[in-house]
Amino acid sequence: MGITDNDIIELLDENDHIIKFEHIITIDHNQNTYVFLTPIEVVEEDHADEIVIFKIGKDKIGNNVLIGIDDESESEEVYESYLQIMEQNESEGED
């Protein structure tokens, strides 16, 4: 399965450079929605398997916005939920 335009999300970094990410999955966890992205163009080799997690929130006028997760325990909990979902999907694919 290849990457389609619908799988690509462009974000601006702190220097206003566009960084393209591939959308991996969106999950609901503890009444919040999280999106998992991976950079398409890897700048540094040690970031090749990097996954970035954002919480989906709302801005002042109700538009969806991506919010970085500062709480390490929240990030770990959401990542564990992601691993469980991926493991479940793999086992269902084996049937």
Image: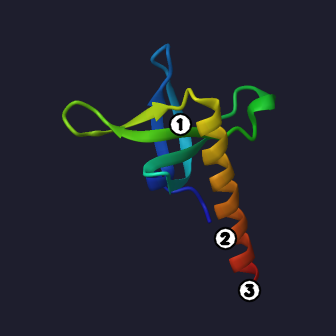
In the rendered image, the residue lying farthest to the left is 61
Tag 3: residue type? Asp
Numbered badge on residue 80: none
User: What secondary structure is found at the residue carrying circle 3?
Assistant: loop
Which residue in the structure is indicated by mark 3?
95
Residue located at (69% from left, 33% from top): 42
- Percent position of residue 13, x then y: 50, 21
Residue located at (64% from left, 63% from top): 85
Q: Earlier in the sequence, mark 2 or mark 1?
A: 1
- Percent position of residue 34, x then y: 49, 47
Residue 21 in the figure: left or right of residue 45 = left
Quadrant the C terminus occupies: bottom right
- Percent position of residue 38, x then y: 62, 42
Residue 49 in the figure: left or right of residue 23 = right
On screen, residue 25 above or below 69? below
Quadrant the N terminus occupies: bottom right
Which residue in the structure is indicated by mark 2?
89
- Percent position of residue 52, x then y: 60, 37
Tag 1: residue type? Lys
On screen, residue 21 above or below 31? above
Structural distance between the alpha carbons of marks 3 and 2? 10 Å
Residue sitting nearer the eye, 7 or 72: 72
Q: Earlier in the sequence, mark 3 or mark 2?
A: 2
Structural distance between the alpha carbons of marks 2 and 1? 26 Å
Which residue in the structure is indicated by mark 1?
20
CB-based contact (under 8 Å), mark 2 and mark 1: no
